[in-house]
Image (tube, rainbow, N blue to C red):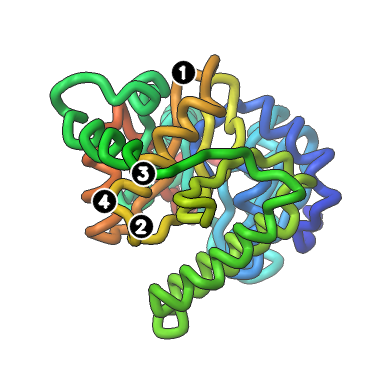
Amino acid sequence: MLELKKIELSDKQWIDPLLKLSDFRGCEYNFTNNFVWSGVYNITVGRFQDFYVSKHGNCFVFPAGKGDTDALLSELKNYCDSTGILFEFCSMDIKDKQMLEQRYPGMFTFDTSEDLYDYVYQSQSLATLGGKKLHSKRNYINRFKQLNWSFEDITPDNIDECKQMSLEWCIRNDCDKSEDKSEEMCAVGIGLEHFFDLGLVGGILRVDGRIQAFSYGEQQCSDTFVTHVEKAFTDYDGAYPMINYMMANRFCKGLEYINREEDMGEENLRKAKKSYHPCFMVEKFSAVYNAGKGQSE
């Protein structure tokens, strides 16, 4: 039977090649996200043939990789039957949803939630902020450039400043009163602690030499950069637009898209992400097995 275990940093060496086989843009198909959020979502992982299997709580993310899909589904269903959990998928890419509908008609019931859709932007759009729609963003950038500002890569010499800023950000934003914020900043901290082993890249924004924002991410797939974290103080107007602008210019050249992940249904975050006018959303679906229905295994 399929064996699952807690994800560890050393698993990156076998998980990344399997993720590359599918080349998904969705942020769940990313080792860093699986690793830093594993405690919050109880993520366990395993391998079946050349499929990367990850289970978030009691729900499987549809496996990335390649192999015998019939055998894969049979193995996952047997696992669910033997452990007494519902056979279901979450955060499924639309291509896999369509594949299940075509190959196994009636076997699954599908659902979706826009709260989980990833926002994807043209890299050039975020790097230039051209056009009337982004005029207000350009104004923020131009005003910020009047300050004594600087931008630099995150390095071993300055990463401790990011860690300290994340702690101060938590205090300023009352993380102790919000479980969601506390969990997010725990994931941010894990990312910073293992930043270089995870292969992350990022930048620091300063005003008068003091850190005001930091952000980090990595290449998600063949044509997309994913921004995992973006944190800024609000001491100066435009810190968030500026760190976003600088990240796009520094790390996203040669990649067509930037995935800035989901809004989780948070209205302010949704408003901010929509204000940059995404070129499309990465739709995600859930699928629940219909026992005794559809094509037989």
Q: Name the N-terminal-most of marks 2 and 3.
A: 3
Q: Amino acid at mark 2?
A: Met
Of discs 4 and 2, which sits in the foreground? Answer: 4
> Going from the N terminus, do you reach mark 1 or mark 4 first?
1
Q: In the rendered view, would you say 178 is above or below 42?
A: below
Nearer to the camera, 85 or 224: 224
Quadrant of the drawing holding the C terminus? top right
Task: Report the front residue among 71 and 7.
Answer: 7
Mark 3 Cα shell of 10 Å, populated few (<14), some (14-19), many (≥20): few
Residue 264: image tag:
2
Mark toward the start of the polypeptide (4 vs 3): 3
Q: Secondary structure at mark 2?
A: loop
Question: Spatial distance from mark 1 to mark 4, Cα to Cα?
Answer: 22 Å
Q: How far apart are the alpha carbons under marks 2 and 1?
A: 24 Å
- Identify the residue at horizontal 46%, vertical 18% (top origin): 256
Q: Residue reaching furthest bottom? A: 177
Badge 1 vs badge 4, beta-carbon distance below 8 Å: no
Q: In the rendered image, which residue does mark 3 sit on?
A: 147
Residue kind at label 3, given as amino acid type: Leu
How many marks on residues? 4
In-image side of 140 versus 151 (left or right): left
Q: Nearer the viewer, mark 1 or mark 3?
A: 3
| Residue where numbered disc 1 is placed | 256
Residue 165 drawn at (x, y percent): 55, 64
- Secondary element at image label 4: helix
**Which one is earlier in the sequence, the residue at label 2 or at label 1?**
1
Instruction: Estimate the spatial distance between the alpha carbons at disc 4 and disc 3, rounded to whole Å.
Output: 28 Å
The amino acid at mark 4 is Arg
- Mark number displayed over residue 270: 4
